[in-house]
Amino acid sequence: MWHDTGTGAGVIPAGLTVQPLGHLENAEGKRRIRNLLEVSGLLDQLVTLKPRAATEDEILRLHTSEYVDRIKDESSKAGGDAGDLTPFGPGSYEIALLAAGGCIVAVDAVLDGKVDNAYALVRPPGHHAERDMGRGFCIFANVALAAIHARQIRGLSRLAVVDWDVHHGNGTEHAFYDDPTVLTISVHQDNNYPPSSGAISDTGSGAGEGYNINVPLPPGSGVGAYVATFERVVVPALRAYHPELIIIASGLDASAMDPLASMMMTSDGYRTLTRLILGVAREVCGGRLVACHEGGYSPAYVPYCGLAIMEELAGVRTELADPLLELLASFGGQELQPHQEAVIREAMKLAAAVPVQPARHP
Ligand SMILES: [Zn+2]
């Protein structure tokens, strides 16, 4: 919560012509998720995992030493920018190590059977971070580093990352673009952020060809489009691939209230997506599922989305209702639209082309 993204107005650095306001990626949304978990009573029924800082060696499994050294140096002084739109303050290096380490702890807890599944509520987020630079508020690639840990240290032979953050998971895609042992699936708003990233034609390269699936949904997509994407693309791809662990890059910025995208998801929509992924996880990998928090910039609404996801993961329904659900669910265009279905049909071909792998039950 102490990772300081500064006084920029939204995502624009404050300056002579920009009145300071506060960065959109701040602690509040995350803090309010945690608070709602407590108020709802769900927190009392969860196992709390204590994060640890990732070691520098763990970070260097993906990131370049020049990049890591620069962040460390600037973080020990006044802070800086990790690359593109990623301001940070003093101490953010250590905090980013905790975020990456928290995701690794979550993976270990699930693989060790300490918990059935886990949600790592961490910041800064990670899915935009590249090997040698930060992007889109992300310093280190939390999800990719957790996946590398699962592969290299825990010895899994296959795992899948499902990224439902509304922006393209470019960092995760690049980390495993030529790697057939990590199936990466990103469902995002077409050409939002990063610019010109996340095309449906980007399917992997070399040995990794066919193991990267992008579903760039048109702006305005609602619950109908998301549920159809998961039922027709994501679940069939996971069923064929038989991962031994599924990691969700859990951005809550596809919500109808988000200022950084133009989608219309609701808490109930996220509940349904969670149920679908949990269902296929139980089929293929004994339910081993880890969600790592990414974006989500409506401090008012992300807590209800987060609660719905964690209720579903825990198999517990609290009595706390989403006060905005009825309004958001009534928005026009929540049902699957023909131009959205056209994209999903293209992506279904990619899912159908994922080679069927033998089950490897944990
Ligand atoms: Zn995002």
Image: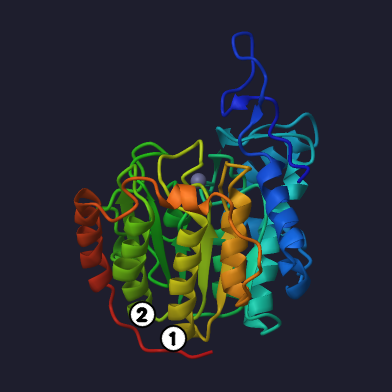
Q: Is mark 2 within 8 Å of ligand 1?
A: no
Q: Secondary structure at mark 2?
A: helix
* Disc 2 to disc 1: CB gap under 8 Å: yes
- Frontmost residue, 80 versus 116: 116
Tell which circle, 2 or 1, labels the residue nearer the N-terminal end.
2
The residue type indicated by label 1 comes to Glu
Q: Is residue 254 left or right of residue 198?
A: right
Q: Give the residue displayed 51% in from the left and 42% down from the top.
A: 257
Q: How is the model colour-coded?
A: rainbow
Q: Secondary structure at mark 1?
A: helix
Which residue is at the far top?
16
- Measured as percent of width and height from the top left, residue 101 is found at 70, 61
Q: Is residue 315 left or right of residue 342?
A: right
Q: Give the residue displayed 60% in from the left and 55% down from the top.
A: 304
- Frontmost residue, 330 versus 201: 330
Q: Which residue is mark 2?
A: 239
Considering the image in quadrants, where does the C terminus appear?
bottom right
Q: Is residue 125 left or right of residue 180?
A: right
Kindly indicate the quadrant of the structure image that contains residue 139.
Answer: top right
- Measured as percent of width and height from the top left, residue 228 is found at 31, 63
Q: Give the residue displayed 40% in from the left and 57% down from the top.
A: 186
Depicted 1 relative to depicted 277: above or below: above
Q: Residues within 10 Å of mark 1 (few under 14, many from 20)?
A: some
Q: Which residue is mark 1?
A: 283
Q: Residues within 10 Å of mark 2 (few under 14, many from 20)?
A: some
Question: Does the rendering let one see residue 267?
Answer: yes
Checking the image for residue 24, the label placed there is none
